[in-house]
Amino acid sequence: MKLLMIYASHFGYTPTIKTLDFVPEVLEGKTYKDVQVAFIQVEKEDEEKIPMKKFMNFVKWLSRKNEFNNIILHSFGHLSESKADPKFTKDVLDKLEEKLITAGFEVNQTPFGYFLDLDMNAPGYSLARVFKSL
């Protein structure tokens, strides 16, 4: 699993193109303020063992450093050449959301299986942008 975390004072999306037949239709976009956006790529090798504990430990560490509680999970298949099956990836994102909510985070997901127009204001400061290979 690859993870790019970007703090955004503003983050919004608008669905543009549906790329997977099995996902529900989404027509409306959303916007958020003061969120940590997790750009996540689930890799083929994660199908053997999901690095759930490493993910949670990293997010908890970063949330303490950056003092955030709101997180957006965004499937982003551009961090590695290795890609897991789309249905497996969606299942992982849902499991990550459950774990984060149990740990006290406010969690949202961008629509899975869509190309999205993104609107983001990401201020530059230490640990505002962090990449992690789990």
Image (tube, rainbow, N blue to C red):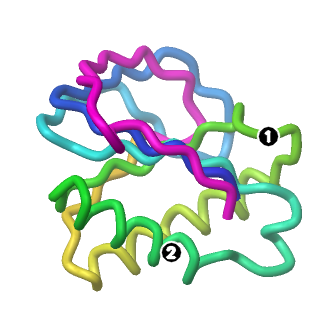
Local secondary structure at mark 2: helix
Q: What residue is disc 1 on?
A: 80
Local secondary structure at mark 1: loop
Where does residue 72 sit, x and y in percent of width and height? 33, 48
Q: Amino acid at mark 2?
A: Lys
Marking on residue 47? none
The one nearer the camera, 8 or 111, is 8
- Residue at 48% of width from left, 15% of height from top? 16
The image shows residue 103, relative to residue 113, as above or below, that is: below
Q: Is residue 122 magenta?
A: yes
Left or right of 65, for residue 60: right
- Residue 29 appears in the picture as rendered: no
The image shows residue 99, relative to residue 18, as above or below, that is: below
The image shows residue 111, relative to residue 67, as above or below, that is: above
Marking on residue 95? 2
Where does residue 86 sit, x and y in percent of width and height? 73, 51
Where does residue 35 sit, x and y in percent of width and height? 22, 43
Which span is picked out in magenta?
111-134
Q: Residue reaching furthest left?
A: 33
- Residue 31 appears in the picture as rendered: yes
The one nearer the camera, 123 or 126, is 126
- Residue at 23% of width from left, 67% of height from top? 64
The one nearer the camera, 118 or 35, is 35
